[in-house]
């Protein structure tokens, strides 16, 4: 399975990384325009998903970037925003009087869980680029659980990166998603080669 330290070193040593990170981070500050950045992340996942190799793609084919950004946003709505909102609502009903510290811990655990489910859904979707693939909730949850059991600490690193850059939230979002997508896609790709699960 891909090693996070090696992956991170390869990423920052890539001559295109800093330009792509800067452009993607800036785009993430602007609603609607941020869809281009999400489309770029989608393109990175697609490259790894189909070739098994990591490279930073070019910022071109802007119409396709925008369409891919919309796809990613729709998947995030179903497998990210809605589960987080629902989960937080349920927790507030079950634990109505929790303090700020407990609230932050529960919120962090929920966000990390949602992140791996979202990454799993993106990987599943890209096999056929059919939204019907997203209806296989059981398989997507199984993928997320396998990843959490094996590589859960990586998501903690991504979450830490997210908070490190949080005052510059565009870079925070883009950087955390970039690392999470590359790591999870590499993990699932290797697993698929060995077991043919997805």
Image (cartoon, rainbow, N blue to C red):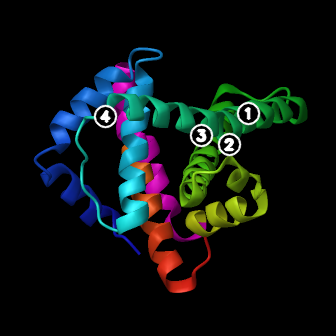
Provide the residue span drawn in magenta. 149-177
* Percent x, y of residue 23: 24, 27
Marks 2 and 4, the one that precedes in the sequence: 4
Query: Residue, x 63% and y 65% (percent of image)?
Result: 143
How far is the residue under mark 2 from the one under mark 4? Answer: 27 Å
User: Dot 1: what SS?
Assistant: helix
Q: Which corner quadrant holds the C terminus?
A: bottom right
Query: Residue, x 25% and y 35% (percent of image)?
Result: 59
The answer to the question of whether label 4 and label 3 lie on touching residues, with beta carbons closer than 8 A, is: no
User: Dot 3: what SS?
Assistant: helix
Q: Is residue 163 visible?
A: no
How far is the residue under mark 1 from the one under mark 2? Answer: 7 Å
Residue under pointer 4: 61
Marks 3 and 1, the one that precedes in the sequence: 1
Q: Horizontally, is 156 left or right of 19 in the view?
A: right
The answer to the question of whether label 1 and label 2 lie on touching residues, with beta carbons closer than 8 A, is: yes
Which label sits on residue 82?
Answer: 1
The answer to the question of whether label 2 and label 4 lie on touching residues, with beta carbons closer than 8 A, is: no
Q: State whether residue 91 is above or below residue 49.
A: above
């Amino acid at each position: 399975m891909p090693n996070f330290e090696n992956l991170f070193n390869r990423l920052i040593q890539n001559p295109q990384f800093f330009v792509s990170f800067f452009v993607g981070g800036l785009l993430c500050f602007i609603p609607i325009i941020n869809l281009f950045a999400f489309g770029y992340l989608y393109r990175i996942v697609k490259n790894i998903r189909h070739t098994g190799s990591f490279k930073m793609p070019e910022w071109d084919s802007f119409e396709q970037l925008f369409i891919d950004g919309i796809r990613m946003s729709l998947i995030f709505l179903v497998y990210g925003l809605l589960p987080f909102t629902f989960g937080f609502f349920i927790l507030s009903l079950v634990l109505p009087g929790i303090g700020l510290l407990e609230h932050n811990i529960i919120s962090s655990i929920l966000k990390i869980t949602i992140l791996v489910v979202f990454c799993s859904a993106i990987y599943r979707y890209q096999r056929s680029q059919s939204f019907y693939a997203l209806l296989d909730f059981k398989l997507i949850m199984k993928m997320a659980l396998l990843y959490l059991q094996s590589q859960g600490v990586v998501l903690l690193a991504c979450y830490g990166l997210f908070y490190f850059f949080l005052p510059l939230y565009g870079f925070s979002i883009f950087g955390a998603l970039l690392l999470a997508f590359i790591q999870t896609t590499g993990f699932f790709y290797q697993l698929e080669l060995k077991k043919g699960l997805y």
